[in-house]
Image (spheres, rainbow, N blue to C red):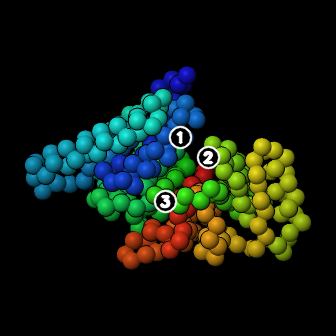
Amino acid sequence: MLEPETSAPIVVGIDGSEAAVKAAQWAAVEAESRHVPLRLVYATKSSHPSADDYYDDVRRGQNALSAAQIKVNRRYSEVKVETALVDGPPRRALIDESGRAAMLCIGSVGIGRYAESILGSTALEVAEGASCPVAVIRTQEDDSPVRWIVFAVKNPAEDHVVESAMAEAQLRQAPVLALGDHRDGHAFLNQVKTIQLRHPDLHIYPITDRSDVARFLRRHDEPVQLAVIGESEIADLPRILGPHGRHVFHLFEGTTSSVLVTR
C-alpha cells in the first residue's frame, strides 16, 4: 500500500534521452521500496528567442515526460508516477526540486539538450547544492553475474554512508566491497565485522589497499554497479565518473559504476 501523497518523492531529471529513462527505471526501484511517488521533471530553457521556440520546448518536454512515464509504468506498475514541466535552467530546477525530494536522480550520459546541460561541472554543482541524496545513474551494459556495491570505510565511520550502501545492497541484492586502509587494518576489519553483525544477510568483503572509491574504480576491473560516497567525497565525483573528451562525467574506459552521494 502506498503512503500518502505527502511522502517525499524520488525525483528524476528527464530530457528525452535513453539515459534519463534508465535513471527513471533505477529510481522506480527506490520509489517502490519506499512506497513513495516517482516524480519525473523536465526543465525548460531559461529563455527562448520566440514564442514558437518556447512552445516547441514545452512540446518536447511533454513528449519526453510521457514517453518516460510509459516505460516506467510498463515495468513498475505499482509505482505512482508524477510528471512536471518546470522552469530552467536544469541545474537550478533540480536543486530546487531536491528540497522536496527523498532522492534526486540524473542520467550520466545522454544526447539531449538537458543531458548536455547536466553533464560536466554542472552535475557536480547539482550534487553539491542539492538538499537530498543525489544518484548519478550510468547506463550499464555489463552482464556480469556479480555486480558490487562499493564504499569506503572512514574513521570515524560515516554511518549515513554505511547504511545507505547496506540499504542499496539489500534492495539490489548485491554483494558489498568495503574499502579501507591496511595501515590500520585491525581497526578497519573490526569496523567491517560490526557492519556485518548489523547486516547478517548481506555479503560484505573488506579490501585493504588504501584505495578511496575513485582510485579503486580506476585500478580494478571488478564490475561495480554503484559507488556510495558521502558529502566529504563530493570533490571526487569527477574522478569517480571520469573525464572523456569535453564531458567530465563520462566514465573511465571499462568503468560502468553509478554513484550515490548520501546525506
Could you tell me which secondary element the residue under label 2 belongs to?
helix
- Which quadrant of the view contains residue 210? bottom right
Give residue 223's position: percent from left, percent from top.
61, 63
**What residue is pinned by disc 2?**
172
Q: Amino acid at mark 1?
A: Val
Badge 2 vs badge 1, beta-carbon distance below 8 Å: yes
- Which quadrant of the view contains residue 247? bottom left
- Which quadrant of the view contains residue 259? bottom right
Q: CA distance from mark 3 to mark 2?
A: 16 Å
**What residue is pinned by disc 1?**
29
Sequence order check, earlier mark of 2 and 1: 1
**What residue is pinned by disc 3?**
141
Query: Going 20% across and 54% down the picture, which residue do you hit?
Result: 47
Sequence order check, earlier mark of 3 and 2: 3
Q: Amino acid at mark 2?
A: Arg
Give residue 92's position: percent from left, percent from top.
37, 53
Task: Give the numbered dot on residue 119.
Answer: none
Give residue 56's position: percent from left, percent from top.
16, 48
